[in-house]
Structures are given as structure tokens and as C-alpha cells.
Image: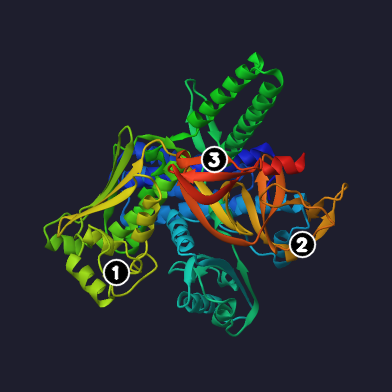
């Protein structure tokens, strides 16, 4: 137990642990390249020791024990002046992953505990308290990439909880059978506990309670049949939300260094909230300027100063939202290593000229796109060591990410020194499928065609032909965005992405309300709900509430209790600590655009605007999240 679960010490430990985990991963990757470098060994020891000390003080015994194991192994290496071998590195990485998962469970438990205290009526909290099931663990970078790809394919994401009878014989074997049954139907992204040769020798009682996090499109009934073997005590299949899982664990704190020795950590969500306040100030300043000009006939000097201060604040928030691309790409070293190891390959990743500055959300998008290209390079491009030796190549394959930033464009190249693309095989598969080249670049048109692949069998890492099509589609959303490919048999393949420079990303949730298509900034959409799951209430002045949220339509009109809405769906918008329910007829899809490409026009409502994209009129309306502020005044 933690001495004080609400204490600042515990919060500090959770923040510090992120830095320790990053330091351990960074040092291990560097040490694997230079196994006798004493600086990397010292850094490993310091991070492990610091993690152990803080965990031990807060009585987090399992984390402290795992960190102590790392510390002791490093000390042994120090004492004997020996270079760690591959199996030792695998053990180190496995220990770091275990600590990361335990920390993730702590964060999730803390988050849900706060949610229970804040609102015991929430259905999700009640479900969790009834089931007493573990919460979402911290996922590895590779597992996160699998989730993102599944989301792009519009697959469902769910958790399968299975509890075996206390009298179950050979729990590990039964648990493994359940996982195998699931893997034949869906993609198992993560399991708790984890399976493997070492796990089979552990306490078998650990496998009496099982959690599988899966993606796919099968109905729950088929999953139920797959896991309903003998000696099962309980089965629970629950849908999960990609945004809440990835949003909580993918978004890392961005560090901002100032001219002094202090370092300030600003959470990405806090930056979004700060930008929200700035946007609201701009809206209010514009309205005030218009009203005063109409009444006074001239612009107020104080209002002009206020407007300039708001503009300066906006510039400041943009400046502190900038990050280095190479920092955003650091987790990819581990991704490449783990994927190569799983495929019995040797691959190293190199970054060249990636110290360019970008908006945080743009860097996140580029990082996400590059995951697809790296997986293709490791899975399809780089050969196994024996095959490379036969070709006269070094056993270690090489992938390079290189960036160039010009005035108007960013060019990022992901190149490997592998076998190159089997163009003849790809064209043959295309002909069999009746697919014709759809662009001037015949090779690229085949590569980005969904589902087309030269691999005869797919696995969880590659082979379905998905990935490059998502990269291509994503780049096509930006003005000037494009994807190019160059491949040479036996020498390797290069993918070149081009994006507009200086852009920031805005993710929009597109809904239908009556005959209007409305885009809502997705970062302000807290949840999507069916209205039948709650109830309507009357406010003090007769205004309509759904549970505790005031009910609006997208045009900013508040409903009253003499008229009940015909809609059965709604989205909860959370903005600057205010929340409202906005009615919708249909939730359509999510779209990402460059913020700079959007132009808004007043269309009668103070909250609903006509919108153009890249100077072209769009059929979409834009719903300003400031509707939440109006609904709560």
C-alpha cells in the first residue's frame, strides 16, 4: 500500500517513473550497440537505483523488487567487467516492460479511484467495482502501434476477462488454450498475465484470472464460445475505447528547457486546455470589439491593448507546444529492436537530421505514420542474418530515418538496406486480384492498395497489406502531402514522405445532425453515448438536462423540458472544465486536418460556422467547443 495515495510524493513518483523508464530503455539500446561503454552502464545503474529507492519508500514492493533485480545484474556486470550477452539484454528489456506495466496499472487504478469518488453513478465505474477486474496495463510501443492500425481499420476493441475455477487443473495450460482459441478469431494485442516459456514455470495460480485485450469485428457470442471451456467460473467481454486507452498512455509529458537549470514538465492535455483558454479569450475579445465599435463608433485603446496581449499569449502557447522530432522518434528504437527480435532478425535504427522543431501534434502524427513504414521495413525489407550473409551483406540490417525541413515543406525518408520490393511478385498478385495501377507510379499504386501483399501468410506484425494504404491516405489529406517510393533489388527500399512545414494537426469527429454534417474538435469530445443509458431531468428554469449535462443541439440551442429531442445519440463536450451534451443523429467518422487549412465563417449561430478547407468550401460545419461555456454560464 502507498503511505498516502493522495500525496504529492506519490504523484511525483508516477512522474519520475516515466523518466526512469525512458532512461532505462535509452541506456539499454545504447549499451547493446556498445556493450563495454561504462557511461551507459553507469546511467543504467543510476536509473534502476533511483526507481528502486522511490518505489521502496512508497511501499511499491513489486516495482522495487524488479528494479533491484536490474540493479543487481548491472552491478554483477560492473564487478566482472563483462559485456552483457543477448539473453541478458532480453532479460533487462523484459524487466523494464514488467515495471512499465505495473506503473500503468497504478496510474489506471488511481484514475479510476478518483472517478469513483467524483461520480459514483457512472456506469463504467460501477461495472469496474462489481467485477473487481484489473485495469488497463501500460502497453508497449509495439502494442500501441497495433491498436492504432486496428482503429484505422475500424475494428472493435474489447477486453475479455476470464476467471478459472479455483479447482482448475493445470491453469497455465488451460489459460494458454483460451489464448490460442482467441488468436484464431481476433488479434490479441496484450494479455495479463503474459505467456511464455518463463511464465509456465511461475506460480500457476497467477493464471486463474486472465485478461485479453483484443481487436477484431466478431460478435461477442463467438468470442464467448471460444473461451467457454471446462472449469470456467466467469466470463466478461467489455468494449473499450481506443481514445481513452491510447490517449491516457500514448500522450507523454513534453519537457521544456528554459535558460536556467530548472526543467518544467507540461502534460499534453494541459497544453490543449491552455490553448482552449486562449481561443476563448480571442472569441470574447472579437465580440467585445464588435459591440464597443458599434456603440462608441471607434475602437477602445484598452481593448486594442487587450487584443494585442491575447495575440502575444497565443504566440507563446504555440512556442511552448513545439518539440524536437528526434525526441518523438525515440520510442521507435525499441520498436525496431523488439520487432526484429521477434522475427529472428538483426536491425539497427539510425536518425539523421531529425532535430527539427515541429508542433507537438504534428510530431505525434509523423511518429505514428513512421511506425507503419518501420514495420514494413523490418518485416518485408530486412533479410535474416543467414540470407544477408549469403548476399555478402553485414548480418545487421540498417534502417535510417532522415528529415529535411525547407520553408514550405518537410521531407522525411525512411530507408532500409534490405532485399528491395518484389515488383514482379506484387504485379502478379495484382493481376490475380484484377487490380489495375491507379496512378502514374505503378509500384506505389500497388503498394498502397488495401489488402494486397506478396506474403502468402499474415501474422500479427505484417502481411495483410494494410499499413502503407493508411500512410498514403493520411498524407493525401494535407495540401502538398505525398508519398514516394524508390526500390532497388538486393539493395533496399526508401519511402519519402512530404508534408507542409509548420503545420499542426486538428482531429475532427464528424457527425450528422438532421441534414447537416458537423465537425467537432475530437480532443474536446469526452464521450459518445446512447441517450437510453441515462435519463432526462428538468433544471431550475425548465432547461433540459441529460443526467447532469445541459442538452444542446449543434446550433447552440438549449432544449427545454416541454420538448423532448427525437435523437437517440449524443456527444459530451468537455471544454475549460465545462460540459454539455450535444445531440446528434449519427456519428460518422474521424478526420485529421492541418489547422492552418481551416477557415471559419459566421453562419448565424455563434457556435456553428461554415468551414472551408485549403481555400475550398466544405460541406462540413464546424462546431466551436465554446458552446460548453455558454451552456454552463
Foreground pick, 372 / 37: 372
Give the mark nearest the N terminus, 2 or 3: 2
Q: Is residue 47 visible?
A: no
What residue sits right under mark 1 in the picture? 453
Which image quarter: residue 123?
A: bottom right
Q: Are marks 2 and 3 in contact (CB under 8 Å)?
A: no
Q: Is residue 33 visible?
A: yes
Q: Which mark is residue 534?
A: 2
Which image quarter: residue 451?
A: bottom left
Give the mark nearest the N terminus, 2 or 1: 1
- Residue at coordinates 58% horizontally, 35% vertically from top-left? 275
Q: Are marks 1 and 3 in contact (CB under 8 Å)?
A: no
Percent across and percent down for residue 260 are 49, 20
Check disc 1: other Cα within 10 Å, few if <14, some if 14-19, many if 20+: many
In three-dimensional space, the C-alpha distance between marks 2 and 3, rounded to whole angstroms, equals 34 Å
Percent across and percent down for residue 593 are 46, 47
What residue sits right under mark 3 in the picture? 600
Amino acid at each position: 500500500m502507498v503511505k498516502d495515495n493522495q500525496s504529492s510524493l506519490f504523484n511525483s513518483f508516477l512522474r519520475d517513473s516515466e523518466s526512469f523508464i525512458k532512461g532505462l530503455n535509452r541506456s539499454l539500446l545504447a549499451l547493446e550497440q556498445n556493450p563495454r561503454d561504462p557511461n551507459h552502464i553507469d546511467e543504467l545503474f543510476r536509473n534502476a537505483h533511483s526507481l528502486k529507492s522511490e518505489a521502496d519508500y512508497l511501499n511499491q514492493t513489486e516495482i522495487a523488487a524488479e528494479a533491484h533485480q536490474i540493479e543487481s545484474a548491472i552491478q554483477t556486470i560492473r564487478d566482472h567487467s563483462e559485456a552483457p550477452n543477448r539473453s541478458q539484454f532480453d532479460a533487462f528489456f523484459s524487466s523494464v516492460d514488467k515495471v512499465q506495466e505495473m506503473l500503468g496499472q497504478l496510474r489506471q487504478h488511481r484514475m479510476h479511484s478518483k472517478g469513483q469518488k467524483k461520480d459514483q453513478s457512472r456506469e463504467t465505474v460501477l461495472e469496474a467495482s462489481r467485477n473487481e477486474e484489473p485495469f488497463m496495463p501500460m502497453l508497449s510501443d509495439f502494442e500501441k502501434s497495433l491498436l492504432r492500425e486496428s482503429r484505422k481499420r475500424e475494428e472493435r476493441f474489447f477486453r475479455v476477462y476470464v476467471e478459472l475455477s479455483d479447482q482448475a487443473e493445470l491453469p497455465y495450460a488451460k489459460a494458454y488454450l483460451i489464448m490460442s482459441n482467441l488468436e484464431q478469431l481476433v488479434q490479441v494485442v496484450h494479455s495479463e498475465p503474459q505467456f511464455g516459456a518463463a511464465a509456465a514455470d511461475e506460480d500457476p495460480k497467477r493464471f486463474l484470472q486472465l485478461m485479453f485485450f483484443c481487436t477484431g469485428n466478431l460478435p461477442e457470442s463467438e468470442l464467448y464460445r471460444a473461451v467457454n471451456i471446462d472449469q470456467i467460473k466467469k466470463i466478461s467481454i467489455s468494449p473499450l475505447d481506443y481514445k481513452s486507452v491510447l490517449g491516457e498512455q500514448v500522450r507523454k509529458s513534453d519537457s521544456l528547457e528554459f535558460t536556467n537549470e530548472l526543467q518544467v514538465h507540461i502534460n499534453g492535455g494541459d497544453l490543449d486546455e491552455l490553448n482552449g483558454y486562449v481561443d476563448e479569450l480571442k472569441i470574447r475579445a472579437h465580440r467585445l470589439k464588435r459591440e464597443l465599435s458599434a456603440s462608441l463608433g471607434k475602437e477602445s485603446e484598452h481593448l486594442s491593448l487587450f487584443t494585442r496581449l491575447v495575440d502575444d499569449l497565443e504566440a507563446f502557447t504555440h512556442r511552448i507546444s513545439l518539440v524536437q522530432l528526434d525526441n518523438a522518434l525515440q520510442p521507435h528504437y525499441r520498436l525496431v529492436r523488439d520487432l526484429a527480435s521477434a522475427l529472428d532478425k538483426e536491425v539497427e535504427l539510425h536518425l539523421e537530421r531529425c532535430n527539427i522543431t515541429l508542433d507537438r501534434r504534428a510530431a505525434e502524427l509523423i511518429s505514428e505514420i513512421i511506425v507503419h513504414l518501420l514495420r514494413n521495413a523490418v518485416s518485408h525489407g530486412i533479410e535474416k542474418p543467414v540470407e544477408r550473409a549469403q548476399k555478402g551483406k553485414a548480418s545487421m540490417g540498417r534502417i535510417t530515418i532522415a528529415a529535411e525541413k525547407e520553408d514550405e515543406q518537410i521531407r522525411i525518408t525512411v530507408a532500409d538496406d534490405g532485399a528491395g520490393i518484389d515488383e514482379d511478385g506484387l504485379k502478379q498478385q495484382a493481376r490475380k486480384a484484377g487490380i489495375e495501377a491507379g496512378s502514374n507510379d505503378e509500384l506505389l499504386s500497388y503498394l498502397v492498395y488495401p489488402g494486397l501483399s506478396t506474403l502468402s501468410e499474415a501474422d500479427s506484425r505484417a502481411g495483410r497489406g494494410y499499413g502503407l494504404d493508411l500512410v498514403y491516405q493520411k498524407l493525401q489529406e494535407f495540401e502538398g502531402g505525398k508519398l514516394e517510393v524508390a526500390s532497388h533489388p538486393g539493395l533496399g527500399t526508401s519511402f519519402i514522405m512530404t508534408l507542409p512545414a509548420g503545420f499542426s494537426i486538428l482531429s475532427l469527429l464528424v457527425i450528422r445532425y438532421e441534414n447537416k454534417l458537423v465537425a467537432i474538435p475530437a480532443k474536446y469530445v469526452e464521450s459518445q453515448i446512447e441517450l437510453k443509458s441515462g435519463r432526462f431531468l428538468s433544471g431550475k428554469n425548465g432547461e433540459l438536462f441529460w443526467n447532469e449535462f445541459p442538452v444542446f443541439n449543434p446550433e447552440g440551442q438549449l432544449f427545454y423540458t416541454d420538448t423532448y429531442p427525437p435523437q437517440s445519440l449524443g456527444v459530451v463536450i468537455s471544454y475549460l472544465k465545462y460540459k454539455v451534451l450535444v445531440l446528434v443523429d449519427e456519428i460518422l467518422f474521424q478526420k485529421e486536418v492541418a489547422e492552418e487549412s481551416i477557415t471559419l465563417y459566421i453562419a448565424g449561430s455563434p457556435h456553428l460556422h461554415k468551414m472551408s478547407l485549403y481555400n475550398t468550401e466544405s460541406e462540413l460545419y464546424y462546431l466551436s467547443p465554446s458552446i460548453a461555456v455558454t451552456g454552463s454560464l
